[in-house]
Image: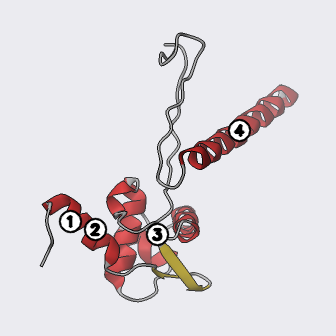
């Protein structure tokens, strides 16, 4: 039974890695912030087999001029907004309670990973290890205001 369980864990681990790799490839094919449609299943084009469970990948697009925080998944948007509102470098342990999570090690480390991903994609900067600031202060929120108001904000 233990050997079978270990085999299943190994298979699950490979599937998880494969899913992450596919998400990266899709992101690369779609370009920064692009979207690519993927057909799942063996049915006709655009049809998903009913027995197939599709697990979506959260994609954080690379920052570019004119792109607002609205394109980010909710948790990433919340993180960027907290960092921008702080006005000074913040650590993951300071961000966690501000986005409504308990300040426990698991949540802090998960948030640290998201902060690092936001740095990789150009949304934030990390001048010193563990100290995160907005890469484009004021720009992202102004872009969001322009998109929401359909006109310049004062």
Residue 113, placed above or below residue 3: below
Indicate the secondary structure of the residue bearing disc 3. loop
Indicate the secondary structure of the residue bearing disc 1. helix
Q: CA distance from mark 4 to mark 1?
A: 39 Å
User: In the image shown, does 3 or 94 lie closer to the viewer?
Assistant: 94
The tag on residue 103 is 3
The residue to which callout 1 is attached is 146
Q: CA distance from mark 3 to mark 2?
A: 31 Å
Q: Quadrant of the C terminus?
A: bottom left
Single out the residue that lies furthest toward the top.
43
Q: CA distance from mark 2 to mark 1?
A: 5 Å
Neighbourhood count class around disc 4 (C-alpha, 10 Å): few under 14, some 14–19, many 20 upward: few
Indicate the secondary structure of the residue bearing disc 4. helix
Measured as percent of width and height from the top left, residue 106 is found at: 56, 62
Residue 30, placed above or below residue 102: above
Q: Residue at x 71, y 43 (%)?
A: 17
Task: Compare marks 4 and 1 and give the one earlier in the sequence.
Answer: 4
């Amino acid at each position: 039974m233990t050997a079978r369980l270990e085999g299943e864990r190994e298979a699950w681990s490979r599937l998880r890695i494969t899913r992450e790799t596919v998400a990266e490839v899709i992101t690369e094919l779609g370009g920064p912030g692009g979207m690519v449609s993927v057909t799942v299943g063996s049915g006709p084009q655009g049809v998903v087999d009913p027995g197939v469970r599709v697990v979506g990948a959260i994609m954080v697009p690379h920052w570019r001029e004119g792109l607002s925080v609205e394109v980010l998944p909710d948790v990433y948007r919340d993180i960027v907004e907290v960092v921008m509102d702080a006005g000074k470098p913040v650590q993951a342990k300071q961000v966690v309670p501000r986005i409504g999570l308990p300040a426990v090690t698991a949540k802090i480390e998960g948030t640290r990973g998201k902060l690092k991903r936001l740095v990789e994609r150009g949304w934030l900067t990390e001048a010193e290890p563990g100290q995160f600031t907005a890469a484009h202060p004021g720009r992202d929120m102004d872009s969001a205001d322009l998109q929401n108001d359909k006109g310049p904000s004062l």
